[in-house]
Image (cartoon, coloured by chain):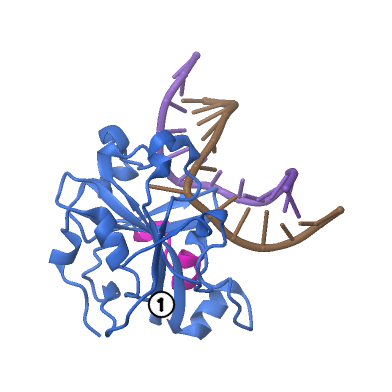
Chain colours: A blue, B brown, C purple
Amino acid sequence: MQKLNKEFYLGTDVAVLARELLGKIVVTKFNNQYTAARIVETEAYAGIIDRASHAYNSKRTNRTEIMFAEGGYAYVYLCYGIHHMFNIVTNKAGKPDAILIRGVEPLEGGKWMLQRYKKDRFDSSIGRGPGNVGKALGIFTAHTGTSLLSKHFFIAEDGVNHLNIMASKRIGIDYAGAHAQWLYRFFIKNHPQVTKHPFNKSAIAML
DNA sequence: CCAATGATTGCCT
DNA sequence: GGCAATCATTGGC
């Protein structure tokens, strides 16, 4: 399995990168628990010009500081006090783009995932939704700032496969005004680990 | 200092 | 379809 290199993360078009991440594999090996899952849904957040981005208007806080680093780091933040949201920082240093991983298909380490959910059987909710991505893979806010070129936390190339990719508006960002209309959400058509949402119906197929 | 809230989820009726 | 859970971060005082 080939680890994505630094150049990938330095790409300057966050929407293109969000689409390219579909099908790739997130690998974590925390506390000696190996888990891997295929990315099936992403959202792009375009740095300082995007009203939906935490770094909009160059807003720098302790939390968002990692977004301003060069691409290739994890940005993990807590949402609603419960959900650990895993983002991938991209672009050059000073260009705070990020990609939210919203859905993954479990591939390896199912027993660790079940343990994290306190379940004894698999169901399609495991890995579906951004909060569940962190939950399945054991990613917490403490991992923010971790390099994705490290041994225990990285993204890997998957072999070849033709994916049926759809684009839609992003979920849960009504406050972003006109920017909420951008087609910056990408997902694999009809995949069970993709969030169920009305936007799915108006999504556009991509070549 | 302190109140308000969110790139959400899952359980309830 | 409605809504409670739960807390770090944020911004206002």
Residue A19 image point, x, y percent: 31, 63
Q: Badge 1: how crowded within 10 Å, few (<14), some, or many (20+)?
A: many
Compare residues A41 and C7 and report the one nearer the observer.
A41
In the picture, the quarter occupied by the C terminus of chain A is: bottom left
The answer to which image quadrant residue A181 occupies is top left
* Residue pictured at 51% horizontal, 54% vertical: A199
Residue drawn at x 51%, y 62% is A129
- Foreground residue among A98 and A135: A98
Magenta residues, start to end: A132-143
**The disc numbered 1 marks a residue on which chain?**
A
x%, y% of residue A54?
Answer: 35, 42
Report the residue at 15% width, 49% height from top: A93
Q: Which residue is mark 1?
A: A37
Query: Which image quadrant is residue A10 in?
Result: bottom left
Badge 1 marks a residue whose secondary structure is: strand
Residue situated in front as seen by the camera: A102 or C9: A102
Give the residue displayed 49% in from the left and 39% down from the top: A174
Q: Compared to A134, does A181 lie above or below?
A: above
Residue A82, percent from left and from top: 55, 54
